[in-house]
Amino acid sequence: MRFLDTNILLYAVSTVPEEEVKARRALTLLEEDDWNLSIQVLQEFYVQATRASRPDRLPHVHAAALIESWLRFRVQETTVPVLQNALIMKERHGLSFWDCTILAAAHAAGCREIFSEDFAHDRDYDGIRVINPFR
């Protein structure tokens, strides 16, 4: 079981020339069907992809359609147990609360790997190994 972090989704829609290699890699990852996401990841994607200061900003309708297409993946909700585990992970690992909520959602979904550029590559967080697919 594998989990995708928000940055993978954002690279998949990037048209910034400096991110072309990462965009291609992200699109390749999204062709696979065995991913898990969380509500938080989808929310973060929407906020970041549509923000006014983004150079390749997506219109609402496009961002919403992408989110709808990604609902084909298993989506972990943010529940009270996810929140409680995020608080424990925050204390244990010293990461941001939001990063810990993503890790806790991956844990709740039964994932053993999280694909992300934002965590330390190959680090294990309570049984979840980080893979930076852009290394």
Image (cartoon, helix red, strand yellow):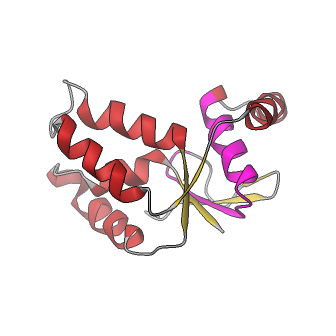
Residue 21 point in image, percent of width and height:
27, 64
Q: Nearer the viewer, residue 88 or 123?
A: 88
Which quadrant of the view contains residue 69? bottom left
**Magenta region includes residue 116:** yes
Q: Quadrant of residue 43?
A: top left
In the image: residue 29, left or right of residue 19: right
Q: Is residue 24 above or below residue 126?
A: below
Q: Residue at x 47, y 73 (%)?
A: 33
Residue 34 against residue 45 in the figure, above or below = below
Q: Which residues are magenta?
A: 98-118
From the top left corner, tell me how far across and down residue 80 is, in percent.
76, 31
Quarter holding residue 82: top right
Q: Which of 91 and 39 lies nearest the eye of the viewer?
A: 39
Q: What residue is rendered at 24% in x and 32% in y? A: 50
Left or right of 112 on screen, residue 77: left
The reply to whether the magenta stretch includes residue 63 is no
Camera-nearest residue between 101 and 17: 101
Q: Position of residue 58 (x, y in %)?
A: 18, 40
Which residue lies at the image location 19% right of the left edge and 45% below the top edge?
62
Q: Quadrant of the N terminus?
A: bottom right
Q: Is residue 30 left or right of residue 108?
A: left
Which residue is found at the position 35% from the left and 49% from the top? 67
Above or below, comparing residue 49 to residue 32 in the picture: above
